[in-house]
Image: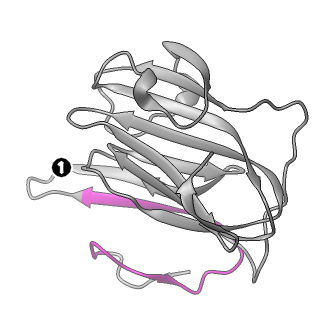
Amino acid sequence: GTINNANSAATNVTNLTQGVYQFQITVTDNQGSTNQASVQVTVNSGNSLLPAVNPNNIVNGIDYKYYEAANYRAVPDFSNLVPVKTGVSSNFDISFANRPEEFAFNFTGFIDIPSDGQYTFYTNSDDGSNLYIDGVLVVNIDGQHSQAEPSGTIGLMAGKHAISVGYFQQTGVNFLTVSYSGSVITKQIIP
């Protein structure tokens, strides 16, 4: 691939072929402080669609794990954390938080895709969130920020696919909704 302007706040990446790419960005402020973030990009060939995983013995709802800490500045690596509480919810519900600030959630479950095609997923959050389908990062709006709703599109075959949404709240307003749309689905909150 070619990064058109690696020193710009916004750039295009072209000439990507099928594969998985890991991009790292380093940001430097006017005082010389730096921070880094990474993102994984999966490029599929042509109209390729991810196959359904169709697990056995699933139940309705989405599993959640709730965490508390004062130092969240990004969606944490949940694999190294011990949740304060766990449960099952009917949707991506952050009202299970014990307090209004300094917490995080990791939601995991499955989404039923009705037909083969391209699907767009949205996370509307304040602060950071990310959304994975079958382990592929589809939406990433990490870090501290006011409410925003980015989207990402992925090709999926009909059937069940693993979905995971990470979210953190530092201070101020806390908000999270997760939606999707496709050729046979108008944009809606994921049921």
**Which quadrant of the structure image shows residue 102?**
top left
Q: Residue at x 68, y 74 (%)?
A: 183
Q: Can residue 36 be seen in this view?
A: yes
- Quadrant (top left, top right, bottom left, bottom right) of the C terminus: top right
Relative horizontal placement of residue 149, taking residue 28 as reference (left or right): right
Q: Where is residue 170 in the image (x, y as percent from the top left)?
A: 27, 32
Examine the image and state in which quarter residue 29 appears: bottom left
- Give the crowd class for mark 1: few <14, some 14-19, many >=20 residues within 10 Å: few
Describe residue 34's horizontal placement relative to residue 186 as left or right: left
- Which image quadrant: the N terminus? bottom right
Q: Which amino acid does label 1 sit on?
A: Ser
Residue located 31% across and 37% down the image: 73
Identify the residue position indicated by label 1 in the image. 33
Magenta stretch bounds:
7-27
Indicate left or right for 89 with 3 as reference.
right
Of 48 and 5, nearer the camera is: 48
